[in-house]
Image (cartoon, rainbow, N blue to C red):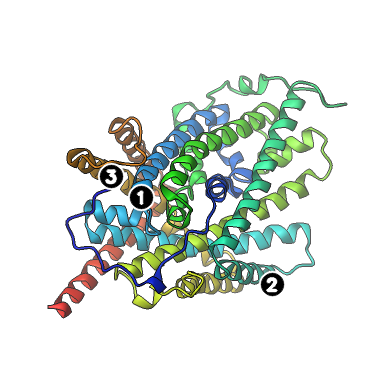
Amino acid sequence: MPASQTPAPATPPAAARLGHALKPRQLIMMGLGSAIGAGLFLGSGVGVQAAGPAVLLSYLVAGALVIIVMNALGEMAAAKPTSGAFSVYAADAMGATAGATVGWLWWVQLVIVIAAEAVGAAGLLATVWPAIPVPMAALAFMLFFTAINLLGVKNFGEFEFWFAILKVAAIIGFILIGVALLMGWLPDVASPGLRNFTEHGGFMPKGLAGIGAALLVVVFAFGGTEIVAVAAAETEDPERSIARAIRTVAWRILVFYIGSLSVIIAVVPWTSEALKSPFAAVLEAAKIPGAATAITLIAVIALLSALNANLYGASRMMYSLAQRREAPAVLGWTDPRQVPIIAVLASVLFGFAATVMELVFPDKVLPVLLNIVGSTCLLVWTISLLSQLILRHRANRDGTRLPFRMAGYPYLTVIGLGVLALIFGLLLSEAHTRLQFLSMAALTAVIAASSEIARRVRAGRGS
């Protein structure tokens, strides 16, 4: 993708370069694993209760949006693989302030979510093994995954690969059990057939309003898929790897989500209180022993996988910001193994602090922080689509060869932006989400203003 007209920062010295140790298989599984988290295993029931069986339409809209965003990111990442990903592409398309703003905003989101995932995983684990204190488990998780990220991207990639394998295997097993239940193949278990799709008020018991309400719930379940573009910079043969990952990951995510939700809706009435833990409810209906414990442990794995991936993503974004002089230069330093250890430690430091504060003041710290950054992924997606629209136009105008070209340009990009505008409108229309949107907008404005001021100060010193 062609660079912007603003001068590019000097090429970092060899000691500050990242490696290319991630395997293509690890990138593909990272893309799958990043979207299969606790939001699916534990939170999907909220969407079902909001819209009834029509929640499938909400998932189709959200899934189509993610496919568009991933293809747009894939086009830019294949042309210019960089650890700053959408932050760099925003800078190329709309200027350095836009790039720095989206980079810092994403980093702030990730370091807050890291703390939430550590505390959440520890809390879930305590429901299975109460003997393990939540504070001890949360801090142990933070220490362990900090060590994994400090050991190098190869170790990180292998951990994420096996985490994703476990989650994907759990989803496939769940769908197969659900199909067997619905077909009447399980002993002593009566099949409900498909009546739950039409009973209890029909397929759309809450109308279009229910689908819109569910869309606000389900769209956030796909958050994290953008980390594939960040990881592309450290992958072998990134031009080919990112294109392959985009082609395979997007539709698999949709199949896993739609397949899982179809089973849940068919087996559990949308009015049931059992939807508080939808996967466990289906397995209990299938008379699978230890269902609740199994799903809880899978949710713990999902949270820890996300913690690991988010720490990686945060450290690489911070490294990229430092390389572009948008963060202190020391954060761009790498050790002989090409690990940005200062960026890793800086990213995890806030996570440690927020974890300790949440454990000392339960349910008081993280809910506030998460509310501020709750809509950040939607803004990142919006900026990514705008960047692709601008940079693809430049590439076409200049006759630049792109290793991977997003099909349907510019129509799909515009459709994606339209869906995002609809979602932002829904956020503003609901009282409980309006504050989240306004908090995110205020944080974005503060970061943008700070970035611009810092840039002018540097320019003044340079002159």
**Residue 90 pos. (x, y %):** 28, 53
Quarter of the image for residue 195 reads top right
Q: Residue at x 60, y 63 (%)?
A: 118
Q: Amino acid at mark 1?
A: Leu
Q: CA distance from mark 1 to mark 2?
A: 35 Å
**Residue 35 pos. (x, y %):** 54, 46
Q: Amino acid at mark 3?
A: Leu
Label at residue 379:
1
In the rendered image, the residue lying farthest to the right is 188
Which quadrant does the C terminus fall into?
A: bottom left
Quarter of the image for residue 443 reads bottom left
Up the image or down, 429 lies above or below 184; here it is below
Up the image or down, 120 lies above or below 77; here it is below
- Label 2, secondary structure: give it: helix
- Label 3, secondary structure: give it: helix
Q: CA distance from mark 3 to mark 1?
A: 11 Å
Q: CA distance from mark 3 to mark 2?
A: 44 Å
Which of 121/74 is in front?
74
Residue identifier under label 3: 386
- Label 1, secondary structure: give it: helix
Label at residue 277:
none
Q: Earlier in the sequence, mark 3 or mark 1?
A: 1
Up the image or down, 222 lies above or below 370; here it is above
Q: Earlier in the sequence, mark 3 or mark 2?
A: 2
Residue identifier under label 2: 136
